[in-house]
Image (cartoon, rainbow, N blue to C red):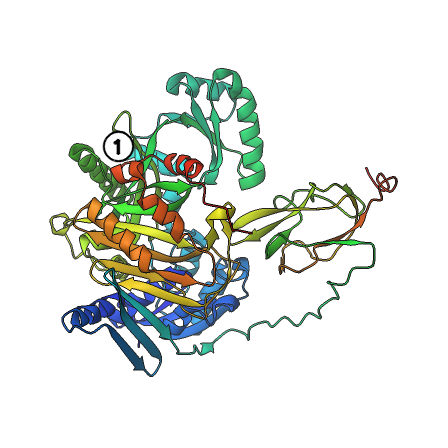
């Protein structure tokens, strides 16, 4: 089936991003916008706008029934869920299926398979992927048995957790019983699911991920990315390819990601997240994200592909048009996430009215944004304003160009994280490449912003 | 029409070969200025003027609730405002007991609620010693920076503390 009218059930920069591909492909774009977003830049860019619901996400972007109602109201053939919100929610996929609307994402079975950490892990094991040594711990005896295998320090993780939530570090055997009790009761309270598992704690790990695309039968790997620069499990900066990975390991990572995609009969865009152990130079499966990612543009820059277009094609039921041999990674790309946050005040959110937006432009420079002069950044959603994506001949070139581009970029009216990126790009350890996920917190300790003159 | 980053890049390429320093383009629903910023490179300033026509669904629910006189606080009482605008929650998570209830005694540092702004949680401190008199913002309700979340009857130096305390 050919998609002719696409409902975009999301907001912010990703909505603008999907609209751009629709315009290029001649697909009519309909933005489903909450009351807070009816005058947003994506609403101005879309061919049509339909009201989704009130500003509160629970009654709009997070309500599958509201999304399907909006899709039916405009007679859309397909729904693009973007990232976050309902993008990996089987309830939306099912609701779409029931009324004969294409959900631009993987099958309901795949969403279930990777949506639960333990299920995802068992699929990864079945597909032959290495996982962090560990296992489920229903009680203390089970936890002790797993601990004997993996050693200390270890992590107790909530099955229902994610994004760093529901994770506890246990340094020694003496702390296991107490931490396990705490983790189980907290998991039950926070996620409504008391199940926890225990796994080895990797002291110095990098977050490396492989982009895959499948048509349900065949799958291809579109290179890897490094997203190790994080604060409280929120990514700030990403790059492709992941630097300083031995060729052999890089090839193994791609093979592992493909094995999982093929095992799942995966159809759509997906990201296989891996934990790269810097000391052992090996990797473990972490989880699979069954959606387009925020950082997808770095992959687009180095492969020359439009991932949204590829995603729409497989959602239409078309077989992959590319083979693995068609995928070539050229140069290096970096992405700076520019958020409405105040570094000088512990990254305090800074919603408000944007006065002016001036963007760098030229070869190898791309800015994905949802704001322009006069835009209001509402307080209800995340703080991402724009992504600066820069492509260079190699990593040093990409970083140098990104630094120059940041100098030119102006988003006035709210406080942004541009200064954070300027400091980051100037850091020697970062410039050397391959920092671990603990790097950025260390970086913040030594790069406290100058508080003089700040009220 | 929309100009994609690729289109703007093409324009910059043309400008690069022209020797011009600035280009101002005005279309029906869009303005674009591309400018050379010294030696560092080109910048663009785009403004999409088109106003979206919203269809389907019901009309946006305008805030028809009559504004309660929230700002007014009787003499001698203290209003607690959010540290920044956001959605006010009275408990650390849904279903959990409230941080404080009417009648509770609070100190300057007592957490009386949290405010969620852009998916980030900021604690709200009482900022004053005294007894919680009433809540003026409901759980899950959006609060502007100047909204009154709750009202505290400040403790006098010698007495007052302990009344209503559990």
- In the image, A381 versus A139, the foreground residue is A381
Left or right placement of residue A324 versus residue B68 in this view = left
Tell which subunit mark 1 falls on: A
Left or right placement of residue B138 versus residue A187 in this view = right
Residue that protrudes farthest toward the right in the picture = B159
- In the image, A417 versus A263, the foreground residue is A417
Q: Residue at the spot x=34%, y=78% of the render? A: B30
Q: Residue at the spot x=66%, y=47% of the render? A: B113
Split into 4 quadrants, where in the image is the N terminus of chain A?
A: bottom left
- In the image, A227 versus A392, the foreground residue is A392
Mark 1 = which residue?
A: A128
Q: Is residue A261 visible?
A: yes
Q: Give residue A155's position: percent from left, percent from top.
A: 44, 27
Residue that protrudes farthest toward the bottom in the picture = B28
Decide: few, some or many residues near mark 1? Use Cα within 10 Å; few <14, some 14-19, many ≥20.
Answer: few
Q: Give residue A392's position: percent from left, percent from top.
A: 19, 51
Residue that protrudes farthest toward the front in the picture = A452
Q: Give residue A265's position: percent from left, percent from top.
A: 27, 46
Give the image quarter of residue A404. Answer: bottom left
Q: How many marks?
A: 1
Q: Residue at the spot x=22%, y=63% of the render? A: A362
Left or right placement of residue B112 versus residue A37 in this view = right
Q: Relative to A142, say whether A381 is above or below.
A: below
Q: Is residue A217 visible?
A: no
Q: Give residue A435's position: percent from left, percent from top.
A: 31, 35
Q: Secondary structure at mark 1?
A: loop
Q: Relative to A271, say whether A95 is above or below.
A: below
Left or right placement of residue B77 versus residue A250 in this view = right
């Amino acid at each position: 089936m050919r998609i002719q009218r696409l409902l975009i059930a999301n907001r912010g920069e990703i909505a603008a991003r999907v609209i751009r591909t629709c315009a290029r492909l001649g697909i009519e774009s309909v933005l489903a916008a909450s009351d807070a977003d009816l005058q947003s830049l994506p609403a101005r860019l879309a061919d049509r706008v339909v009201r989704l619901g009130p500003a509160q996400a629970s009654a709009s972007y997070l309500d599958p029934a509201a999304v399907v109602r909006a899709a039916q109201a405009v007679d859309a053939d397909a729904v693009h869920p973007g990232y976050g919100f309902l993008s990996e929610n089987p309830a939306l996929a099912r609701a779409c299926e029931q009324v004969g609307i294409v959900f631009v994402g993987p099958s309901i079975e795949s969403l279930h398979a990777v949506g639960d950490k333990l299920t995802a892990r068992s699929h990864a094991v079945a597909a032959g992927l290495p996982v962090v040594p560990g296992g489920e711990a229903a009680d203390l005896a089970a936890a002790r048995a797993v601990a004997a295998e993996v050693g200390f320090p270890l992590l107790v993780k909530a099955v229902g957790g994610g994004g760093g939530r529901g994770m506890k570090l246990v340094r020694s055997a003496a702390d296991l019983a107490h931490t396990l009790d705490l983790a189980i009761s907290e998991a039950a309270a926070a996620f409504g699911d008391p199940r926890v598992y225990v796994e080895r704690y990797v002291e110095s790990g990098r977050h490396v991920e492989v982009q895959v695309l499948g048509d349900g039968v065949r799958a291809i790997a579109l290179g890897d990315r490094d997203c190790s620069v994080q604060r409280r499990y929120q990514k700030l900066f990403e790059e492709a390819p992941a630097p300083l990975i031995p060729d052999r390991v890089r090839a193994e990572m791609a093979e592992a990601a493909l094995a999982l995609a093929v095992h799942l009969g995966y159809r759509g865009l997906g990201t296989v997240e891996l934990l790269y152990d810097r000391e052992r130079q090996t990797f473990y499966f972490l989880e699979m994200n069954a959606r387009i990612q925020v950082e997808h543009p770095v992959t687009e820059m180095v492969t020359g592909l439009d991932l949204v277009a590829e995603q729409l094609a497989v959602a239409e039921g078309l077989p992959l048009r590319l083979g693995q041999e068609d995928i070539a990674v050229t140069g290096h790309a970096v992405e700076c996430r520019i958020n409405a946050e105040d570094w000088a005040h512990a990254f305090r959110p800074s919603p408000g009215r944007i006065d002016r937006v001036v963007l760098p432009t030229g070869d190898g420079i791309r800015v994905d944004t949802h704001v322009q002069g006069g835009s209001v950044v509402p307080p209800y959603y995340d703080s991402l304003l724009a992504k600066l994506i820069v492509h260079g001949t190699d990593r040093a070139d990409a970083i140098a160009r990104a630094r120059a581009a940041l100098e030119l970029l102006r988003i006035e009216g709210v406080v942004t994280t541009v200064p954070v990126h300027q400091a980051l790009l100037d850091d020697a350890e970062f410039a050397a490449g391959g920092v671990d996920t603990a790097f950025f917190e260390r970086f913040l300790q030594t790069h406290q912003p100058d508080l003089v003159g700040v009220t | 029409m929309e100009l994609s980053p690729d289109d703007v890049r093409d324009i910059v390429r043309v400008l690069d070969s022209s020797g011009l320093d600035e280009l101002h383009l005005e279309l029906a629903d869009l303005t674009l200025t591309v400018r050379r910023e010294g030696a560092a490179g080109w910048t663009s300033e785009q403004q999409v003027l088109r106003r979206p026509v919203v269809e389907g669904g019901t009309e946006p629910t305008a805030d028809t609730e009559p504004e309660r006189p929230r700002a007014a606080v009787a003499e001698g009482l203290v209003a607690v405002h959010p540290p920044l605008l956001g959605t006010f929650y009275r408990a650390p998570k849904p279903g959990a007991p409230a941080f404080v209830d009417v009648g509770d005694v609070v100190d300057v540092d007592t957490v009386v609620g949290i405010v969620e702004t852009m998916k980030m949680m900021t604690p709200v401190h009482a900022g004053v010693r005294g007894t919680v008199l009433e809540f003026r913002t409901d759980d899950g309700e959006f609060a502007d920076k100047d909204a009154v979340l709750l009202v505290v009857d400040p403790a006098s130096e010698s007495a007052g503390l302990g009344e209503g305390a559990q």
